[in-house]
């Protein structure tokens, strides 16, 4: 467990757009991520095999069987947390991220909506606009400027009090988030209404002193994208906050195949220093909620604390209206816990670094060249069609071992090619999301037009199937309640409770204390008709969603 935590910082490869740093305001290059995949450490033997594979697979020795059994993945239904940690260890996710395209998709959407990517060097030099002085260390006095902000983050702050062997005149905070330092810079960049709106996004590591960690979900240090905007009016800021939570919602549904519920946080759960917080809430495989992304309307709370002002068209000085929004590497944990099974990861095709793996199978030496040539031709055909494909032609492992390894890695499709397949000009294709013989189809033609069309169609089917399965699971585990007793019963069964709510903050905290559940959000999609608060019996305008969470 310790090794996993130590390795997590290397996950910057998932989101980082560029490793180069210039001493000026940077626009990150949009380039696809290429994540290396190491040799496997462990794997179970797959129960799926073709006739030709059975002929060619070397016998598994007793020592190999013992090794496989020793390092098997804990069944998901037996111990969800142990399963989760096993998947991360077996699939080596603490070294290399499982998803590609996260930054690429979001960067495209950020650009389309007028945002610029920036990188803020770690040095704390606050002098001019061309030397971006944000980050890593933030003066503690900045955190103190916004009262609710310092109150909300104090338990999670990591402080630096000594530098160069000497006690610092002012202690520094290792950045937990960037609203304070952003406002310091905005005061230098914003002068007139002509400077607005100012919309930036950065990719950065932040530190929060979590007492109980869970890889990807809660760690002392994590990577995220963090957007900050400044506007002339409250209406523009609200529109921006809603626009960004909509982008996150579409990302979750369309890319990650995670059916999030989008809504507004309660006052108790609102981000420290924000006027409103919007969220996307996802149900994990153990039915706990994961806050997968947030967008905050900060109002003028930070701009008043930092005197972030502009001169309007009438020559009057006004405080800007602001937003901030972010998703982090916890989304990776969400993908693992939403789609994974006892065999390991199950990645949505749109996010898989390898969408198709080709496993060539041969027994005799004179069969090898023909099989590898056919596999190479199939790879070229798929690659030209824009499909992310890899050949596993290593001699050290059996085909069955390879099947299991790539299943564990979550690769959506596997193509098997043996001597008989070469002779018939066809391949065998197996789906990761449909185990056993049901997910295996024989005799798919190697003809380019046929093969490409089939593979693309199956990748689309898998993407849709994962979303449909996760949606059905979510919906079957949400209970509509009309009383506090019903809420407590639903939560005790591990389900989510949805019911009318207009009670006080104190009563909301009572629910948390007595059940362990919190209001995840007031969903944007609300039922029509009159409602009565489940706690007080008073009229309620909205239903709230309660659940235990990570």
Image (cartoon, rainbow, N blue to C red):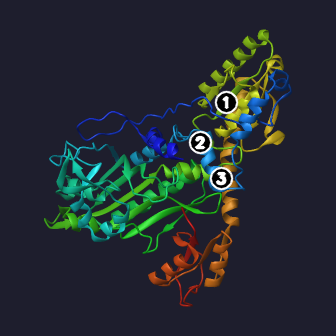
Q: Position of residue 548 (x, y in %)?
A: 57, 68
Query: As drawn, is 284 to the left or to the right of 46?
Result: left
Residue nearest the viewer, comparing 332 with 376: 332
Query: As drawn, is 173 to the left or to the right of 12?
Result: left
Decide: is 391 above or below 318: above
Q: Which of marks 1 and 3 is in front?
A: 1
Q: Which of marks 2 and 1 is in front?
A: 2
Q: Nearer the viewer, mark 3 or mark 2?
A: 2
Quarter of the image where one finds residue 150:
bottom left
Q: Where is residue 246 in the image (x, y as percent from the top left)?
A: 48, 58
Local packing at callout 1 (Cα closer than 10 Å; few below 14, some 14-19, many 20+) is: many
Residue nearest the viewer, comparing 151 with 130: 151
Question: Residue tagged by mark 3?
Answer: 467
Task: Tell me the SS state at disc 1.
Answer: strand
Instruction: Let me know if residue 257 appears in the view.
Output: no
- As drawn, the label of residue 140 is none
Decide: is 486 above or below 296: below
Q: Distance between the residues labelled 2 and 1?
A: 21 Å
Q: Where, quadrant-wise, is the C terminus in this rendering?
A: bottom right
Quarter of the image where one finds residue 323:
bottom left
Query: As drawn, is 134 to the left or to the right of 54?
Result: left
Earlier in the chain: of badge 3 and badge 2, it is 2
Task: Tell me the SS state at disc 2.
Answer: helix
Question: Residue tagged by mark 1?
Answer: 357
Question: Residue tagged by mark 2?
Answer: 89
Earlier in the chain: of badge 1 and badge 3, it is 1
Contact between marks 1 and 3 (CB within 8 A): the answer is no
Q: Distance between the residues labelled 1 and 3?
A: 22 Å
Task: Tell me the SS state at disc 3.
Answer: helix
Q: Distance between the residues labelled 3 and 2?
A: 25 Å
Q: Give the residue drawn at x 63%, y 79%.
A: 488
Q: How many marks?
A: 3
């Amino acid at each position: 467990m310790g090794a996993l935590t130590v390795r997590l910082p290397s996950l910057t490869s998932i989101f980082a757009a560029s490793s180069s740093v210039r001493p000026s305001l940077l626009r990150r290059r949009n380039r696809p991520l290429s994540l290396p995949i190491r040799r496997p450490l462990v794997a179970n033997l797959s129960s799926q095999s073709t006739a030709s594979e059975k002929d060619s697979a070397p016998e598994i020795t007793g020592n190999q069987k013992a090794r496989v059994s020793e390092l098997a993945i804990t069944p998901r239904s037996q111990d969800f947390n142990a399963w989760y940690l096993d998947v991360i260890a077996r699939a080596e996710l603490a070294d290399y991220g499982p998803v590609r395209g996260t930054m690429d998709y979001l960067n495209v959407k950020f650009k389309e909506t007028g945002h610029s990517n920036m990188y803020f060097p770690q040095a704390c030099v606050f002098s001019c606009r061309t030397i971006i002085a944000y980050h890593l260390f933030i003066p503690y006095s900045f955190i103190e400027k916004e009262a609710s902000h310092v109150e909300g983050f104090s338990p999670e702050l990591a402080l630096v009090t000594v530098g160069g062997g000497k006690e610092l005149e002012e202690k520094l905070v290792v950045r937990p988030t960037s609203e304070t330092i952003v406002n310091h810079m905005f005061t230098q960049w914003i002068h007139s209404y002509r400077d607005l709106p100012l919309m930036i996004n950065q990719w950065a590591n932040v530190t929060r002193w979590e007492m109980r960690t869970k890889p990807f979900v809660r760690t002392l240090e994590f990577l995220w994208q963090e957007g900050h905007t400044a506007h002339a009016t409250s209406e523009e800021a609200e529109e921006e906050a809603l626009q960004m939570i909509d982008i996150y919602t579409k990302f979750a549904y369309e890319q990650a195949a995670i059916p999030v519920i989008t809504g507004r946080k309660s006052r108790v759960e609102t981000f420290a220093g924000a006027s409103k917080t919007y969220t996307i809430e996802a149900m994990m495989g153990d039915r706990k909620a994961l806050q997968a992304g947030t967008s905050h309307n900060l109002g003028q709370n930070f701009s008043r604390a930092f005197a972030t002002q502009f001169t309007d068209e009438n020559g009057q000085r006004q405080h800007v209206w602001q937003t901030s929004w972010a998703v982090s590497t916890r989304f990776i944990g969400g993908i693992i816990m939403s789609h994974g099974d006892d065999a390991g990861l199950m990645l949505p095709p749109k996010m898989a670094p390898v969408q198709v793996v080709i496993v060539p199978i041969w027994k005799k030496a004179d069969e090898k060249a023909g099989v590898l040539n056919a596999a190479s031709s199939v790879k070229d055909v798929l690659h030209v069609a824009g499909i992310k494909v890899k050949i596993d032609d290593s001699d050290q492992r059996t085909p069955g071992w390879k099947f299991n390894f790539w299943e564990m890695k979550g690769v959506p499709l596997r193509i098997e090619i043996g001597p008989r397949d070469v002779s018939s000009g066809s391949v065998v294709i197996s789906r990761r999301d449909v185990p056993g013989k049901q997910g295996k189809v024989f005799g798919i033609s190697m003809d380019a037009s046929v093969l490409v069309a089939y593979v693309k169609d199956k990748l689309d089917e898998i993407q849709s199937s994962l979303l449909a399965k996760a949606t059905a699971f979510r919906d079957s585990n949400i209970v509509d309640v009309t009383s506090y007793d019903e809420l407590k019963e639903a939560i005790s069964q591990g389900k989510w409770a949805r019911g009318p709510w207009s009670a006080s903050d104190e009563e909301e905290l009572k629910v948390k204390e007595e059940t362990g559940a919190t209001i995840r959000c007031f969903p944007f999609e609300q039922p029509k008709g009159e409602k009565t608060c489940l706690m007080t019996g008073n009229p309620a305008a909205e239903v709230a969603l309660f659940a235990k969470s990570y």
